Image (cartoon, rainbow, N blue to C red):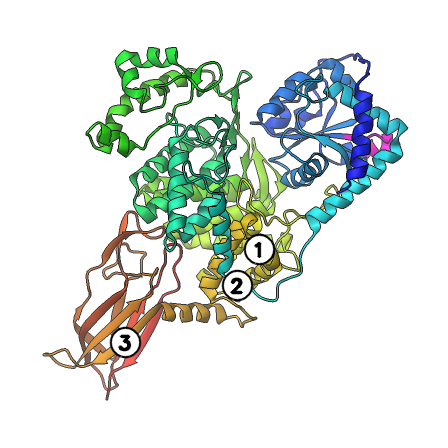
Amino acid sequence: MCPNGRRLLVALIGSMLASQESVMSETSGRKNRLAQESSPYLLLHQSNPVDWYPWGEEAIARARAEDKPIFLSVGYSTCYWCHVMERESFSDPEIAALMNKTFINVKVDREERPDLDEVYMAATQLLTGQGGWPNSVFLTPDLEPFYAGTYFPPRERYGRPGFGSLVIALGDAWKNRRSQIETQAEEVTGALGRHLEERLPPSDKLPGQGVADAALASLSRRFDREWGGFSQAPKFPTPSNLLLLHELAGENPEAAAMLATTLDRMARGGLFDHLGGGFHRYATDREWRVPHFEKMLYDNGLLLEVYALEHARTGDPELARVARETVTFLLAELAAPEGGFRSAIDAETNGKEGAYYVWARAELEAALGPEDAAFLAPLLGFAGPPFFEDHHYVLHLPLPLADLATARRMGREQLLAEMLPALARLKAVRDGRPRPLVDDKVLADWNGMAIAGLARAGRVLGEPAWVARAAAGARFVLSALRPAGGPLHHTWRQGQARREAFLSDYVHVVHALLVLAECEGSPEWLAKARELTDEQIRRLADPEGGFYTAAASRDLLFRTREVFDGATPAANALAVLNLIELAQRTGEASYRERAERALRAFGLLLERFPEGSRMLALAARRYARAFGGEATPVAAAAPVSALEEEARRVVSASLEWGGVDGGDGIGFRLRLTVAPGWHVQANPASADFLIPTRLEAAAGRLEGVTYPLGEAVRLAIGAEGAVQVYRGELTLTGRLIATGSGRPVLSLTYQPCDEGRCLPPVTSSWPAPE
């Protein structure tokens, strides 16, 4: 970093802020260039007196032609402080005149341009030590940042400089101290390059399953054992943490306990909307009680899949309830009639955060009446004093429903049935309030998350209509966001697709297609997943391994590779997971080899920083389990043989001829031992698409075959509800009778599965003794 240069410029600007004169402007009622954009966030600024440009060649060319710095303002439509700054500063004619005189002003929707957002957020963090939105960055005409911050008030307050005074100070510095600004910009850009493009050399060995254990250990050290989650406050859902815990929960009791606690506390807190379903963005407190109220499609899609997967593993009815109510929210509030899903719902209504969701005691009593208010108060957390702004409550469940029911000497379902009419009255009252704004643009990656979650929940909870709606969403994305049969695009609104896809778009849509292939059994989805993956490789593959976030572009300072998890799982980690699954499903060596190359490229980073790359650690674990750890270049058919070898290691068979009395032919006794953590399907199988463990004969026939009864378990993959499986040891008996001139052959077919995947079916054969 450049601490000396930064301190000089900050001190210089600080000294100038003390005495600035106001400059009045003339304004017109015309709309600015943002009126031609499709982003709801940019359209919110179309009537500002600021002479806004969207990011692009026109703005950059003007900045260079007029030798003016660029003011870059990055935000998104459900960002509370973005709205505040828009109202306070960008709608102020006086401040707008200053901005127009001093800068070329550019607005960016971070959800439309995540590649730009990543670079300039990193610049703000380097310059200030913190980040957030709105992100306010000042650039040279060569797009190099020299000063940055987040929210600025119009006049000095909160210990922050006034934005108008800051504009004047920076304009003066550009005019009179240009060399200092250029030095600062050069130092910041150099530091950014080292931060964003630095890469370790490829590892000479693949990271093994141990990196997942190291990532788990880092979560354990940060785990809040009372309230769940992995920080004190604020608390974010962070689905990558939850997906890693789910992956390990079947074998690691600590992982299972951390996951159970976190899912329970999140769902009982105010983070979850107990009237309309769905999750808010994050909690401002340790107890998950007070949320930041925006609702994002990506949070709800990812969390829906997590809750469905964990319900399938545990059978916990509360997880199923939360999943069902999240689906209700998605279909009611974010499903677009064209087939996709809208992006987000704002946190504020009429300038007040949470106004749509919170309750004063008088409002609760008026809606419920005295008797029901007294009944619901201890159940929904408004028995005590108000704890939100202006004497309001956020509804939440202070205790688990099962505990609340036990205290009332009734069953959980009975208590829910008694609560539902009162909850419906509260929701009816809330539905009459002014609603927050909805960002209705369709993003490919976020839609992938929602489609995967909806399909998974539909399969696990036995709701084929949800799977069908997920399939409709996938068909919309594959048509509307691939205009004229071209490459996948990132965003769509009002009939127009924009911006060719980023890595995040490819990996989440491909994951959704693979989930649909699993849920529907249709070859259509696997074929589309392969098609998009091949397109992703052509456009974004890094020759050294892994994938770039975006295609090369003249307006992008740096081309990055997303490896560390954030609000959503790292795109490169999901790319590896998709490649592993495609290699298993298709047997194509190229997918396995590309997954291996990515893991080698990120191997040293993963081993050094597993706590920041949990999904990549999960991917390394799956690769090791799928392909036996250390991998070497292989021929085209090797992935299948490697999987078959693993399947034969997972299930061992010991055959004894004879020992079965009576009848023709020769008796047999086949003993199978299934490794811990694995199972094979019972015979008969629980669903048509499952492969039963079965005996067959060639040049002969079978008589008197007996299959043991299966064990009913709930799994993350497979049919709705419980499925019948064989685990541990089992014995199959019968008689093999020759029907031709050759020696009869006994064969056994089975498919080993664990909680998250299935290996290809394997057949073993034994000729009868002469």
Circle 1 packing at 10 Å, graded few (<14), some (14-19), many (20+), is: many
Q: Tell me which amino acid carries mark 3.
A: Ser
Front residue (pair 613, 51):
613
Q: Please name the residue shown 20% across and 30% down the image.
A: 410
Residue named by callout 1: 606
Q: Is residue 648 visible?
A: yes
Q: CA distance from mark 1 to mark 2?
A: 19 Å
* Numbered disc total: 3
- Image position of 592 (left or right of 551): left
- At label 3, counting other C-alpha atoms closer than 10 Å, the crowd grade (few under 14, some 14-19, many 20 or more) is few
Considering the numbered disc 3 on the image, is that residue within a helix, a strand or a loop? strand
The three-letter amino acid code for the residue at tag 1 is Leu
The residue that mark 3 highlights is: 654
Whether residue 65 appears in magenta in the rendering, the answer is yes
Label 2 or label 3, whichever lies nearer to me, is 3
- Nearest the eye: 381 or 110: 381
Q: Which mark is residue 592?
A: 2
Q: Secondary structure at mark 2?
A: helix
